[in-house]
């Protein structure tokens, strides 16, 4: 007891919560206590201390909400549901950890009333591309529970592996669960190389029951995903008769989209219904995910059985056939008490009223689904794909591409602005997605997930009332200590400064910004090493010529944080004024001047400040100089990543000085996934105006990811030599 009204918690405090609904909260407290190292002296330090009690409160309508009261008499948690007591306990544990010294913590007197903003607060994990053990997944569930995430989306099957044992279909475990080797390096690199090592594994029914129970103890539901009708190559390797051609093909060893999909004949539905009948009893939750994304239609177009189904059921085309396929699965699941959820492609061709949609391609699909009365889970590539790079430095581990920094994750609002209040009610929440083509072990998985999943957790728990990134980053530094205690491997980009270069009409200007309040910024330009005695950054710095900028946080104890570097090259393009078609909001960099800021974009990742992108349009740009500049050639740097729907332009139309003549160009491979398009100019040319027109690939071909969709154009740099 104490005189201030605060609570003096001790290790020896008693714990008493309501029977039944307090069970998971008491288990969480016990597990936390047992996870720490306490000396015998700490355990023996008995004495009168307030206890931790709980009370059922029917006035709290939301079963995930709680009220936590801390005062000199002790700690009391009020809730109406098991989840509410559990989340109240997680908050209490965090309060103790924030204030602990030895075996005691002086907890500030307070009343906390708390409830989640969204019903679906999730994390997705793909175990088909790379297999992860049950124990590894338990580590993830432990962290999810601490951050009050309640949904684990388990992506169990894909082209590269089938990860669930189905007793009635033994070849799924003997054949579909294993691939002969795995692609080394990036999907876009040629020639492709493979590791020559067999990879795979599967989960037994008993292991699934164990994991489902483990998750339930932490108030987490598991939503399984069995991919159909596309991404079925592993299943078809085991049962080729389920394909349209019957060809015997191995489990896929590389990434991408494959034309081999489930045929729509009755034997396929017999197979799927058998799988679902075995799995449904293992997963007591409401939702069952059936994939439904990236299903090429080539095989269906040439299959007599599929064409007969289109004719016999009065369907318009193969998109209608996919909707009919999904509809049959929907009816089957509904008859067994489950609600179908799938990726947003299931909207194409029509969708039953009860199916839920997982919006990954952007807000437009979420808006469409909500306006048609479907529940929606938000996980757009722009803010929720944690397999994208989280930092722009060359030291980052290989990833699929893209750039998703922590600050952008935190900025995510799960409710699209286009929705009114009634439509917004269909947004269940959001999740972070971890696809594992390039994630091969637990360290890398955790590095890609943390701390971005913590930012997503705050988005979906706090909603629009979240305090802002600066406040979040300050608190996150403390959570790095928690992650260290748990042995979690996490990204530390928060401790690196944010660097960028702009043009101001006269040349290049360097900017830097801290991502946290800690420390001060120091920097160098040229080739000088960065030390604690380097210049303090106090504002924009003009750059000249070419060189490097190095910048880091200098902490009060004299330590330097991770050094961030940036190469620049001042050229005639730096003095150009740029106008034209604005880039897509998802990839707008720093605006059109990004193309002339003298900084080369990263060669292995799209997005970030240095790449601009356009979609569903043919952009035009103009570059103008107040004073003509000498030029021998013009170079344009484009990005290519067919797995991400990014293709080189179909045509380029470049004209200089208003002549109206289109210049011929040649193409040269640059570093990584980028290409230079080069236009040679007549000797003695002095440029004052350049017009550029770009035409994208109108339709991605069958067999490729995004088949049938328009391609993106990514342009990163203009250089005048």
Image (cartoon, grey):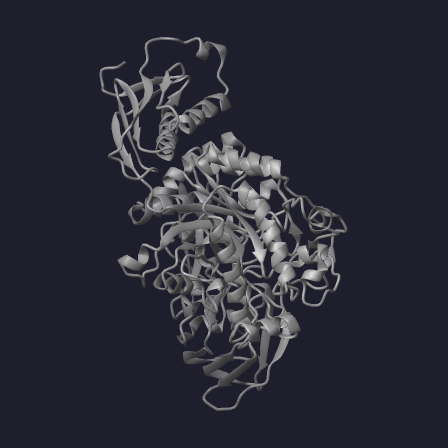
In the image, is residue 271 above or below residue 675?
above
Q: Which sits in the foreground, 396 or 364?
A: 364
Tell me how many marks there are.
0
Q: Residue furthest right?
A: 196
Q: Quarter-wise, where is residue 680 in the image?
A: bottom right
The answer to whether 353 appears left or right of 302 in the picture is left
Q: Which quadrant of the rendered structure holds the C terminus? A: bottom right
Residue at the image point whose x is 26% and y is 21% from the top: 6
Q: Residue 301 in the image: state x and y as whole percent.
A: 62, 74
Q: Using the image as rendered, state which of residue 484 and residue 296 is in the foreground.
A: 296
**In the image: residue 74, left or right of residue 412:** left
Picture coordinates of residue 674 (x, y %)?
59, 67
Report the residue at 49% width, 57% height from top.
Answer: 330
Whole-percent x, y for residue 389 in the image: 53, 53
Is residue 395 shown to the viewer in this render?
no
Q: Relative to 664, say whether 179 is above or below.
A: above
- Say which quarter of the image contains residue 415: bottom left
Quadrant location of the N terminus? top left
Up/down of 421 relative to 484, above or below: below
Q: Does residue 715 appear in the picture of this structure?
A: yes
- Residue 207: x %, y % from top left: 60, 36
Observer-nearest residue: 554 or 181?
181
């Amino acid at each position: 007891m104490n005189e201030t009204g605060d609570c003096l918690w001790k290790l020896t405090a008693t714990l008493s919560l309501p029977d039944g609904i307090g069970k998971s909260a008491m288990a969480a407290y016990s597990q936390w206590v047992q996870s720490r190292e306490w000396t015998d002296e700490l355990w023996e330090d008995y004495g009168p201390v307030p206890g931790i009690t709980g009370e059922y409160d029917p006035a709290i309508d939301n079963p995930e909400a709680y009220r936590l009261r801390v005062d000199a008499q002790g700690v009391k948690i009020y809730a109406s549901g098991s989840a509410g007591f559990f989340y109240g306990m997680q908050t209490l544990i965090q309060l103790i950890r924030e204030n602990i010294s030895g075996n005691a913590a002086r907890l500030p007197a307070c009343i906390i009333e708390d409830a989640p903003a969204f019903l679906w607060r999730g994390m997705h994990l793909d175990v088909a591309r790379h297999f992860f053990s049950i124990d590894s997944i338990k580590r993830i569930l432990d962290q999810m529970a601490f951050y009050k995430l309640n949904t684990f989306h388990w992506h169990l099957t894909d082209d590269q592996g089938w990860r669930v044992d189905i007793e009635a279909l033994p070849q799924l475990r003997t054949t579909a669960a294993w691939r002969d080797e795995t692609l080394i390096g990036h999907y876009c690199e040629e020639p492709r190389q493979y590791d020559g090592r067999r990879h795979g594994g599967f989960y037994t029914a008993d292991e699934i029951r164990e994991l489902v129970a483990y998750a339930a103890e932490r108030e987490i539901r598991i939503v399984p995903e069995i991919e159909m009708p596309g991404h079925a190559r592993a299943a078809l390797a085991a049962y080729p008769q389920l394909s349209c051609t019957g060809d015997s093909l191995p489990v896929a060893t590389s990434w991408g989209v494959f034309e081999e999909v489930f045929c729509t004949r009755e034997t396929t539905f017999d197979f799927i219904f058998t799988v679902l009948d075995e799995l449904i009893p293992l997963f007591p939750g409401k939702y069952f995910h059936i994939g439904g994304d990236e299903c090429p239609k080539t095989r269906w177009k040439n299959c007599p059985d599929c064409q007969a189904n289109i004719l016999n059921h009065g369907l318009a085309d193969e998109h209608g056939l996919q909707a009919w396929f999904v509809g049959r699965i929907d009816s089957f699941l509904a008859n067994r008490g489950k609600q179908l959820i799938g990726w947003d492609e299931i909207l194409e061709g029509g969708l039953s009223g009860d199916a839920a949609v997982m919006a990954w391609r952007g807000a437009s699909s979420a808006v469409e689904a909500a306006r048609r009365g479907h529940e929606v889970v938000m996980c757009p590539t722009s803010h929720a794909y944690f397999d994208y790079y989280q930092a722009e430095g060359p030291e980052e581990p290989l990833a699929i591409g893209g750039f998703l920094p922590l600050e952008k994750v935190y900025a995510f609002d799960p409710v699209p602005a286009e929705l009114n209040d009634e439509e917004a009610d269909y947004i269940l929440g959001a999740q972070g997605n971890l696809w594992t083509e390039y994630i091969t072990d637990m360290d890398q998985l955790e590095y890609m997930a943390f701390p971005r999943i913590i930012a997503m957790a705050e988005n979906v728990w706090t909603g629009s009332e979240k305090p802002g990134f600066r406040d979040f980053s300050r608190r996150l530094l403390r959570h790095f200590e928690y992650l260290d205690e748990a042995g979690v491997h996490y990204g530390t980009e928060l401790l690196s400064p944010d660097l960028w270069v702009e043009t101001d009409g006269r040349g290049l200007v360097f900017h830097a910004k801290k991502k946290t309040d800690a420390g001060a910024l120091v920097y160098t330009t040229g080739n000088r090493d960065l030390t604690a005695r380097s210049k303090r950054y106090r504002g924009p710095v003009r750059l000249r010529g070419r060189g490097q900028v190095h910048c880091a946080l200098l902490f009060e104890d004299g330590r330097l944080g991770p050094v961030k570097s940036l190469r620049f090259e001042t050229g005639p393009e730096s003095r150009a004024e740029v106008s034209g078609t604005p880039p897509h909001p998802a990839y707008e960099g720093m605006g059109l001047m990004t193309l002339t800021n003298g900084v080369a974009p990263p060669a292995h990742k799209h997005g970030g400040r240095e790449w601009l992108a356009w979609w569903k349009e043919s952009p035009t740009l103009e570059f103008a100089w107040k004073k003509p500049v000498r030029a021998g050639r013009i170079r344009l740097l484009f990005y290519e990543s067919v797995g991400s729907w990014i293709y080189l332009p179909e045509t380029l139309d470049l004209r200089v000085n208003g002549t109206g003549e289109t210049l011929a160009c040649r193409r040269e491979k640059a570093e990584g996934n980028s290409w230079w398009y080069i236009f040679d100019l007549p000797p003695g040319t002095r440029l004052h105006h350049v017009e550029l027109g770009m035409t994208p690939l109108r339709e991605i071909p069958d067999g490729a990811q995004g088949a049938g969709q328009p391609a993106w154009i990514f342009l990163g740099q203009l250089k005048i030599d």
